[in-house]
Image (cartoon, rainbow, N blue to C red):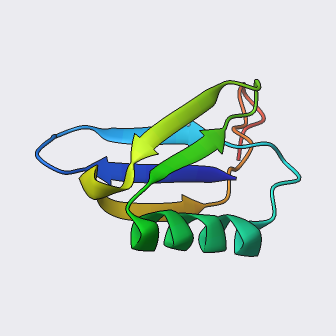
Amino acid sequence: MEIRIGIVQSMKELSIELADGTDRDALEKDVQAALEGDTLLWLTDRKGRRVGVPAARVAYVEFSTTTERNVGFGAA
């Protein structure tokens, strides 16, 4: 799963690829709680790195599933 976070007054977005077993509903609740509490939103990416995002700077949050990219002549 991938989460993209837009940052206020920034043209770039933060894109974090999460572990395959990440529970989407639990993650949405964590994001909502951080936004409501105006705290840091802590996320752990696929490689185990932790990223903290100040909730006051979040413009939007987008959840998506990651898809495998086919490479080569047989790619559809």
Question: Going 54% across and 71% down the picture, which residue do you hit?
Answer: 33
In the foreground, 20 or 29: 29
In the foreground, 8 or 33: 33
Residue 51: x and y in percent read 55, 33
34 lies left or right of 23: left
16 lies left or right of 70: left
68 lies left or right of 61: right
In the foreground, 52 or 23: 52
| Residue 24 figure quarter | bottom right
Q: Is residue 36 above or below residue 71?
A: below
Residue 68: x and y in percent read 74, 42
Q: Is residue 14 above or below residue 55?
A: above
Question: Going 40% across and 51% down the picture, which residue do you hit?
Answer: 5
Residue 46: x and y in percent read 75, 33
Residue 13: x and y in percent read 32, 42
Q: Is residue 73 above or below residue 2?
A: above
User: Residue lying farthest right?
Assistant: 21
**Label tally:** 0
| Residue 72 figure quarter | top right
User: Residue lying farthest left?
Assistant: 9
Q: Is residue 8 above or below residue 32?
A: above
